[in-house]
Image (cartoon, rainbow, N blue to C red):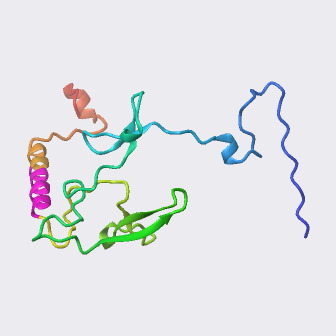
Amino acid sequence: MVDELVPEPEFDDDEAEGHPRPSDSVFDAFPTVQPNIIMDPSDGMPREADPPWTFEDAQAPPLTPETMVCIRQSDSLGPCKHYRRQLALDPEMDRPIILRWCTCPALRGTNGAALSLRDSAMPHCELRDPPDPRSTELLDKLDDEKIRLGQNREYFRMFKTPEDVKLGRTKV
C-alpha cells in the first residue's frame, strides 16, 4: 500500500502573519530565547531575573559542604555512599566536566535514572549514608514546627449543608 501525501491545509488570508502552521517544525514556531532565570540567593531556587541580570546570577550554587551534604563534611564524616562522580568531556566547551549523581534508590526516577546533582544544591538529606547529624537535627526541627502549626487547625467542609444554612454558619 502506498501512503498518500496529505496536502497542506489552506489558510484564510485574514489570518495573522507569524502564527505557526501545522506543518511548521516546533523550532520554527517557538524560536530559542535566552531565559532570564537566576538562582535566588535567598532560597537557592531558580526564579525569573529582574533586569538587568548578569551571568553570575544564573550560576549554580558553589560546591561546599554547606550546599552539598553528599560530599565529605569533615575528616570524621566522609562522603555519602550514594554519591557518585564521573569525569566527562563537554563537547561544546572542549574541556572536562565532573558529573555528580545521587544513586540512592529512594531518589531514582521512574525509569531508574539517578538524580543529577550537577546544577543544584542539596544542603540537607536524611537519606545520606552515613547519616549527617546536622541534617537530622534541622529536619526534626522542621517536623516539630509543622506539628505545632497543625495542632490548632480548623477543618471546614467544602459545601454548606442545609443545617449550616439554617444556623447561619458562614464558615463550613
Q: Position of residue 132 (x, y in %)?
A: 14, 65
Image x and y of residue 19, in percent: 71, 33
Is residue 83 left or right of 131 when viewed as pictured?
Answer: right
**What residue do we see at 30% from left, 38% from top?**
158
**What is the quadrant of the C terminus in the image?**
top left
**Residue at (11, 59) in percent of width and height:** 134
Q: Residue furthest front?
A: 95
Above or below, 68 against 145 in this view is: below
On the rendered image, what quadrant is the N terminus found in?
Answer: bottom right
Read off the magenta span: 133-144
Q: Is residue 135 magenta?
A: yes
Q: Closer to the camera, 71 or 108?
A: 71
- In the rendered image of this protein, does residue 119 appear above or below residue 16? below
Q: Is residue 91 highlighted in magenta? A: no
Could you say which quadrant of the image residue 48 lies in? Answer: top left
Residue 169 or 68: which is nearer the viewer? 68
Q: Position of residue 57 (x, y in %)?
A: 36, 39
- Tally of numbered discs: 0
Q: Residue at x 77, y 28 (%)?
A: 15
Residue at 31% from the left image edge and 39% from the top image edge: 40
Where is residue 167, by image quadrant? Answer: top left
* Quadrant in the rendering for residue 58: top left
Q: Nearer the viewer, residue 154 or 116?
A: 116
Q: Is residue 1 above or below residue 169?
A: below
Apparent side of residue 118 relative to residue 1 in the rendered image (left or right): left
Q: Position of residue 106 (x, y in %)?
A: 30, 69
Q: Main secondary structure of the magenta part?
A: helix
